[in-house]
Image: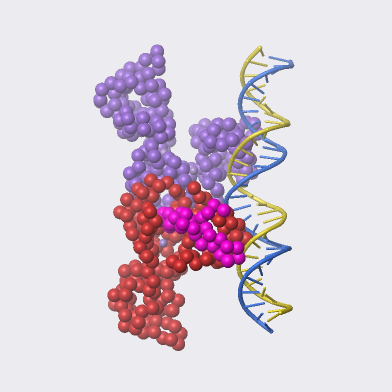
Chain colours: A red, B purple, C yellow, D blue
Amino acid sequence: MFTPTEENYLKAIYKLSGNEKEFVSTSKLAETLDTSAASATDMIQRLSKKGLVHYHKYQGVNTSPSGEKAALQVIRRHRLWEVFLVQKLKFNWNEVHAIAEELEHIKSPQLIAQLDKFLAHPKYDPHGDPIPDAEGKMAPRPTTTLNMLATGDLGKVISTKDSSSDFLLFLDKLNISLGAEIELLDYFAYDGTYSVRINHGPAITLSGKVAGNIFIEKL
Amino acid sequence: MFTPTEENYLKAIYKLSGNEKEFVSTSKLAETLDTSAASATDMIQRLSKKGLVHYHKYQGVNTSPSGEKAALQVIRRHRLWEVFLVQKLKFNWNEVHAIAEELEHIKSPQLIAQLDKFLAHPKYDPHGDPIPDAEGKMAPRPTTTLNMLATGDLGKVISTKDSSSDFLLFLDKLNISLGAEIELLDYFAYDGTYSVRINHGPAITLSGKVAGNIFIEKL
DNA sequence: AATATTATTTAGATTAACCTAAAAATAAAC
DNA sequence: GTTTATTTTTAGGTTAATCTAAATAATATT
Ligand SMILES: [Mn+2]
Ligand SMILES: [Mn+2]
Ligand SMILES: [Mn+2]
Ligand SMILES: [Mn+2]
């Protein structure tokens, strides 16, 4: 149906477009996919001709219904493989993205159906991101990040906004994993840092950048 | 390192070349890979320039040491994935080849190392073919097929020579799986058929073609 | 409002992987 | 040992995906 490159573009456009289905700029897309703006324009026009995206010259792109459907299938495959890699092959959560980036392009529907069954129909991937079902439906992504809590609030880590290897390794060092409870003790407006306690441990300091990349469910 | 297409060619050349490292003709290779002779020539010349094959114009190709090494890695990945698909995802042995044909091109060494561990370091794939180890060493392929037995001999099925989906499904119908014991009762020179008993069941008739595609260990 | 800067698109080229049709080499038949 | 048939290679072309450099449109600055 689609080439791996087309799938990567559709997925990137879908993700960058967000819940509001905003138009995505060529440069943002090119940067995300680590390619030139000229290449991005080229592929956007190709996808547009196939009816997979809405494109307005110089304005941006977003996915059409058929493009969104395709993107969700790729995301489903990607996240199922991530679960497999972590739960079955014992990879750390920071190691799985690059491998899943390749596995996601194997399109056998039976393969994905059997994998889903083998993994007992997981609803979330190792980074807390929801896994679309076979029809493309999935739980909504959370909206509250740690830095949005008020002083004294207690929250539970439910997913990571940034899922770069570096950030995940850093979270490992801080002993922050999915399900960890974090209590926001204090906020220092001076440098934008937060004082928190992780799993009721001692008080530590987190930067605003880190706090903004941890999705929290308020308890 | 290599593109999926290069890997497919190297694997096909290696396999067609056999134990005797015979030279493989362009037409045989093209037929195996379901492509045109012109395309095969094109790729052969490309692989030759990279030192992966020995090529003599109009005579044929076989793998060089570096090409053989690469081919064995692809075969290792292919067969490990086949084991995964059958043992873990519960595919039938006739369904796994096409999927493994894609999975084999994912080159993460850690992925294969972890998969191998997860599968408890299997030595044979679901068709009885030996799995090369990380260094490329593997058990020799068997040489005795069912039609080579003498009347009255008892043998055990250890692998299939043909691993096409059709043939494997046919074996399922006959209740012939790896490990099955087959007793050769009689041979009819008139039409080249064999009378056999499978797992000490009733006498049935097999064609010479079928008998020639079942590798046997004489008991 | 005119100018400068930045973003985006187009133009033109390259590479891998394919194809068909024609040419050349090898093998088979007479 | 010619002639014929088959196999293989070459020639020339296509498509997907990329690039750099140039042109154009949109945005920002004075
Ligand atoms: Mn990908
Ligand atoms: Mn993920
Ligand atoms: Mn393959
Ligand atoms: Mn096999």
Q: Is residue A141 visible?
A: yes
Answer with the quarter of the image where residue B148 lies: top left
Residue B164 magenta-highlighted: no
Residue A70, magenta (yes or no):
yes
As drawn, B199 above or below A26: above
Left or right of residue B24: residue A177: left
Q: Residue A130 in the image: x percent, y percent?
A: 37, 62
The residue nearer to you, when weighing D9 against B142, is D9
Q: Residue at x 38, y 66 (%)?
A: A141
Q: Nearer the viewer, residue D9 or C1?
A: C1
- Residue A125 is situated, as x and y percent measured from the top left of the image, at 37, 61
Q: Nearer the viewer, residue B159 or A17?
A: A17
Residue B206 versus residue A120 in the image, above or below: above
Q: Write down the region rendered in magenta.
A: A49-78
Q: Residue at x 37, y 18 (%)?
A: B193
Residue at horizontal 48 percent and vertical 61 percent from the top:
A14
Q: Quadrant of ligand 2?
A: bottom left
**Residue B130 place in picture, x, y as percent:** 41, 39
